[in-house]
Image (tube, rainbow, N blue to C red):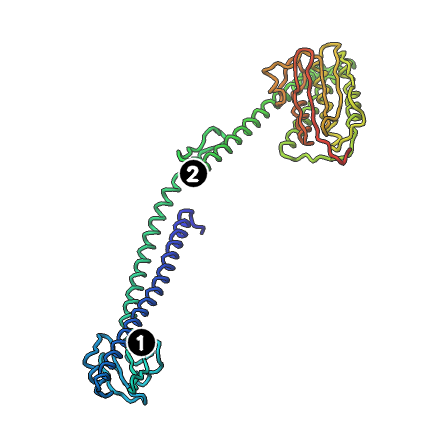
Amino acid sequence: MRLSIRTRLTVWYSTIVVAILVTGAVVGWFAQSRLALQRLDDDLVRSMATLQGVMRTEFNEGMTLESSAEEASTEVVVPDQTMVLTRPDGSLLDVWGLPLDHAALSMLGGNGEAVTIASRAGALRVLRRQVDYEGHRYNAAVIAPLAPMRAQNAEMLRAMSAGIVIALIVAAAGGWLIGRQTLKPLTRMAEQARQINEQDPKDRLAAPPVDDELGRLAASFNGLLDRLASALNHQRQFMADASHELRTPVSVVRTATQVTLAKDVRSADEYRESLVIIGEQANRLSRLVDSMFLLSRAEAHGVLLRREFLNLDDILAESARASRVLAQQRGVTVIMDGEEEVSFTGDDALLRQMMGNLLDNAIRHARGNGCVTAGLERVNGRVVLRITDDGPGVAAADQDRIFERFVRVGTSDGAGLGLPIARWIAEAHGGALQLAGSRPGCTTFVVTLPVDPRSV
């Protein structure tokens, strides 16, 4: 089972707090232990200095080693410490202070630094000095038990442990409450997101008033919903427009079929006329379906360009010849202009379709007995295709709409898919299609394509 974000935040927060406290407690405990031991060693040094001072005073008064030791045992008394005086051969002169077992006395050794020894009564801290003063030689030792210091350290450790446990409880509770309060807007947004559906995609998340991570998340999610709603509306509009476009040829085919079959016997000319009508509408349906399929695949990035070395001027000339039938029907003259031997690397079929769509659009909108001019040129390392017609032009209100699907302006009888397909083909080749200008008597579409240096 995966833990919730709030639980994970609480665990991490509590773990970090406890780790910091434990680290601080361990460091503090070691530091306190060293300081306590240092204080104990300082006390032993002071006691040793006092004991040696008393012994020197007694020696200066002419007293013997034994008498000086006896006198020192009455004058130098330090609570919680034991004083030991021995002869150079190790025999005992005197011992006073805290009781000390004989086994511990036998382990006294060394000279100068304080050391720790173990005894049946517990660990002891011992400072021993070998003294030679004006012919008097003896050994002096100051001993203190470590049990009181270790008891203090243990008490400190218990207090720190209790503090860590309390801090852990407080940190966990605080982290849980803070996480709950902080993530409450996220829970609320999740509930709102579950209520948004495709039936009414206008609902949006209520973004927090502050500009923090949750606020930016809500704003980004709302932006995503806006884009999805736009795509959904675009898809619905596309389906509605496609249905409208498909309904007309289907209705014509159905009507022609019903009229033809209304009589049991028809002449050959009547059957031919009906089949001609059905064939024309079938061709229209085929072109419309192919265009819609191409646009759908383009949106899904399902069209792969088959790049090859091409001469764009040859493709433009062939496209112009292919559009001659439509041009003759309208009395329009297609004039070729521009440079020759314009090389390019691209998809032959798609580039032919782009040029054919642009020429078809220009011929449909040119005036009767008018002309359409098409030409290629190289400009600053790019190939520029210009197609101009002498029609009435595109109204200013429609110039931003002509590249949308199923948009038809003026008296055009097309499906409204030629320009959107042409723009997509240009963009698929890394270029752009734009309406360079439109006024009565002159409407120019410009395609700009980047030239691959290898194709030059």
Q: State the quadrant of the C terminus.
A: top right
SS under mark 1:
strand
Q: Is residue 5 above or below residue 56?
A: above
The answer to which quarter of the image holds residue 388 is top right
Q: Specify the amino acid type for callout 1.
A: Arg
Q: Specify the amino acid type for callout 2.
A: Asp
Q: Is residue 282 visible?
A: no
Q: Position of residue 358 (x, y in %)?
A: 71, 21
Query: Mark 2, residues whose alpha carbon is within 10 Å: few (<14), some, or many (≥20)?
Result: few
Which residue is labeled 1 in the image? Answer: 125
Q: Position of residue 196 (x, y in %)?
A: 46, 33
Q: Position of residue 167 (x, y in %)?
A: 32, 55
The answer to which quarter of the image holds residue 16 is bottom left
Q: Position of residue 194 (x, y in %)?
A: 45, 36
Q: Nearer the viewer, residue 408 or 132?
A: 132
Is 186 placed left or right of 322 in the picture? left
Query: Mark 1, residues whose alpha carbon is within 10 Å: few (<14), some, or many (≥20)?
Result: some
Q: Is residue 375 above or below residue 52?
A: above
**Among all residues in the image, which is located at the extreme left?**
74
SS under mark 2:
loop
Which residue is labeled 2 in the image? Answer: 212
Q: Nearer the viewer, residue 50 or 249?
A: 50
Of the numbered discs 1 and 2, the one sitting upstream in the chain is 1
At x 29%, y 83%, the residue is: 133
Is 226 placed left or right of 251 in the picture? left
At x 32%, y 52%, the residue is: 170
Q: Nearer the viewer, residue 223 or 27?
A: 27
The answer to which quarter of the image holds residue 44 is bottom left
Is 101 placed left or right of 418 in the picture? left
